[in-house]
Image: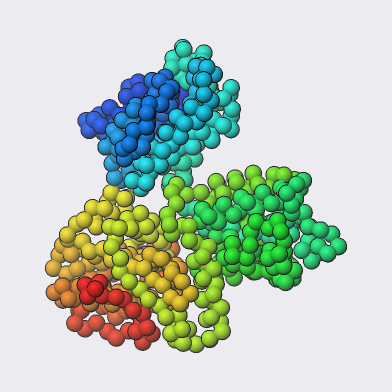
């Protein structure tokens, strides 16, 4: 039944917990206000319960003990001037365990005495002190997130969020409406942690990014400006721009003359989005479902990674019928609803619990991939295409890229030999284990950096090393980069004195593309069970000479540097 979660607070959250119990297993602390004691006590019922996600919804006024004055600035690592907050964060850091997730609320300082503050800026300063501590914790711990408490209170308003009556009766700080919203947000974040976000948002142009028709703008000016409905379209573009900075890949699918549309994108003074913000473009008069299918192939992504946004009910309905895997949200009737609608699309389909550096580079990476596809079309010959790409790979330290390593292994489905999944704690233990060898690769070519795109875990405990997991990002599939990466592992293990290397393929619904991988790479089939699981072995001294284009891939020898 659902996830195992904990909700800890210094105020009464019993109603929030009751609401969450409908869908999840929820830890119930005895009382409230002892969150650090519960976390620090290894024998507590909290640790026996072992929640996957812990939410700490903290009231800043109670944490401050109603002391609303900042002392002289203290110079320390945390740079938090309020002693109570400084101490709380130092203790909290000692409670964070690898392998578990923690959401800590940001702050909205509230209490009956707030109106009597002699300096209104003091309230903001105290809230900023708390946020500073949250950011400090999040930077030091990849499993710490910030819970959007301020956003919830701001949306409802103070008068609808807090109740002195229930506070005096039972230390219940929040109104029923506020507690419902807190429970809803917790439930949403639990789902987000477990879900797989979409990757690409494909948008129409006319009456979607601007009002009016690009091909008719000489006669009828477009609605795109700093006022009236033109501002509504401009704000929608601002939301889209933020989405691209959060890892959403933006593309265009529009029925238009390309030169007319690009002229608007390049030249209109109120365009927020420019050409470089779109990773892919299909501006033509073909059916949109055909363009979307072509984009999916071009980006090497499944159609289920796509969301289509178009003002035309007919176009939306056709895409729904022809490509049911693609998400097609409704389109608002009034332009003033565009920006809020796009915000909801982001939250529903694209929002991630935590952004990595890789996520922020998605648009650039996919735009570079479009250039690769055009080169392949121009050259024609596959071998010549690979030669011109000038692919280069290098090994990197897995311990220095733990967050990306976990993401890569857990989110890769097509090129995934065994589809094992690991928590952050498990992966840290694997990297530190001398009987395991973790290979993590970065790949680049003449168009740009693919990033960290392949990882393999080799078990060295037995006489013969065993590849227990191997993944490769879809970004580099189809270029036989795997030939060189496996060759590097083979040479490395042979140099370490091993005579053989074993591997395994475990079939899933999505990893059909690598079913014959070991066969193609020269390994001998050792066994196969009725479920399709296969084991392979190779004598390292008999490593075959594989496809000749692998010679064009360079892997630096780190030991020689």
Quarter residue 20 falls in: top left
Front in this rendered view, residue 403 or 177: 403
Front in this rendered view, residue 123 or 150: 123
* Residue at x 21%, y 56% (from the top left corner): 432
Q: Is residue 264 left or right of residue 42?
A: right
The percent position of residue 220, horizontal first and vertical second, equals: 84, 59
Quadrant of the drawing holding the N terminus: top left
The percent position of residue 188, horizontal first and vertical second, equals: 49, 40
* Residue at x 15%, y 65% (from the top left corner): 462
How many numbered marks, from 0 up? 0
Asked if residue 403 is positioned above or below residue 260 in the image, the reply reads above
Asked if residue 497 is positioned above or below residue 41 in the image, the reply reads below
* Residue at x 62%, y 60% (from the top left corner): 202
Front in this rendered view, residue 464 or 477: 477
Quadrant of the drawing holding the C terminus: bottom left
The percent position of residue 85, horizontal first and vertical second, equals: 36, 30
* Residue at x 31%, y 37% (from the top left corner): 76
The percent position of residue 70, horizontal first and vertical second, equals: 41, 26
């Amino acid at each position: 039944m659902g996830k195992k979660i904990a909700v800890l607070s210094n105020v009464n959250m019993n109603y929030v917990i009751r609401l969450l119990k409908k869908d999840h297993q929820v830890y119930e602390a005895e009382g409230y206000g002892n969150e650090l004691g519960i976390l620090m006590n290894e024998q507590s019922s909290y640790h026996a319960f072992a929640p996957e996600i812990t939410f700490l919804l903290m009231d800043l006024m109670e944490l401050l003990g109603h002391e609303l004055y900042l002392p002289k600035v203290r110079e320390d690592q945390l740079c938090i001037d309020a002693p109570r907050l400084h101490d709380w964060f130092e203790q909290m850091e000692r409670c964070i365990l690898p392998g578990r997730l923690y959401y800590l609320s940001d702050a909205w300082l509230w209490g009956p005495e707030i109106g009597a503050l002699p300096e209104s800026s003091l309230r903001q300063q105290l809230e900023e002190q708390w946020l500073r501590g949250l950011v400090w914790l999040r930077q030091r711990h990849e499993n710490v997130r910030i819970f959007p408490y301020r956003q919830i209170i701001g949306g409802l308003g103070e008068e609808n969020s807090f109740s002195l009556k229930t506070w005096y009766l039972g230390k219940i700080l929040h109104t029923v409406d506020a507690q419902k919203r807190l429970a809803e947000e917790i439930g949403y974040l639990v789902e987000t942690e477990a879900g797989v976000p979409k990757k690409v948002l494909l948008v129409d142009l006319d009456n979607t990014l601007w009002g009016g028709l690009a091909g008719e703008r000489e006669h009828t000016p477009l609605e795109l400006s700093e006022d009236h409905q033109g501002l509504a379209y401009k704000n929608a573009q601002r939301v889209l721009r933020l989405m691209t900075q959060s890892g959403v890949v933006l593309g265009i699918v529009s029925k238009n003359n390309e030169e007319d549309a690009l002229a608007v994108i390049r030249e209109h003074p109120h365009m927020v989005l420019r050409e470089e913000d779109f990773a892919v473009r299909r501006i033509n008069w073909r059916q949109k479902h055909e363009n979307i299918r072509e984009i999916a192939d071009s980006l090497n992504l499944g159609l289920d990674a796509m969301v289509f946004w178009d003002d035309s009910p007919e176009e939306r309905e056709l895409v729904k019928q022809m490509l049911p895997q693609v998400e097609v949200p409704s389109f608002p009737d009034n332009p003033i609803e565009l920006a809020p609608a796009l915000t909801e699309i982001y939250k529903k389909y694209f929002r991630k619990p935590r952004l990595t550096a890789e996520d922020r580079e998605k648009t650039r990476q996919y735009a570079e991939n479009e250039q690769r596809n055009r080169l392949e079309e121009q050259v024609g010959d596959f071998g010549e295409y690979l030669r011109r790409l000038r692919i280069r790979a290098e090994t990197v330290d897995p311990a220095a890229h733990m967050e990306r390593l976990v993401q890569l292994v857990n989110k890769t489905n097509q090129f995934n030999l065994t589809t094992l999944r690991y928590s952050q704690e498990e992966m840290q233990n694997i990297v530190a284990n001398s009987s395991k060898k973790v290979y993590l690769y970065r790949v680049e070519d003449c168009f740009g950096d693919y990033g960290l795109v392949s990882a393999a875990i080799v078990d060295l405990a037995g006489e013969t090393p065993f590849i227990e997991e191997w993944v490769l990002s879809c970004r580099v599939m189809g270029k036989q980069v795997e030939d060189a990466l496996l060759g590097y592992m083979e040479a490395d293990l042979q140099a370490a004195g091993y005579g053989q290397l074993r591997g395994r393929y475990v079939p899933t619904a999505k990893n059909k593309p690598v079913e014959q991988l070991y066969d193609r790479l020269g390994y001998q089939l050792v066994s196969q069970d009725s479920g399709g699981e296969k084991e392979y072995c190779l004598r390292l001294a008999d490593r075959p000479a594989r496809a000749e284009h692998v010679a064009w891939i360079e892997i630096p020898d780190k030991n020689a540097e």
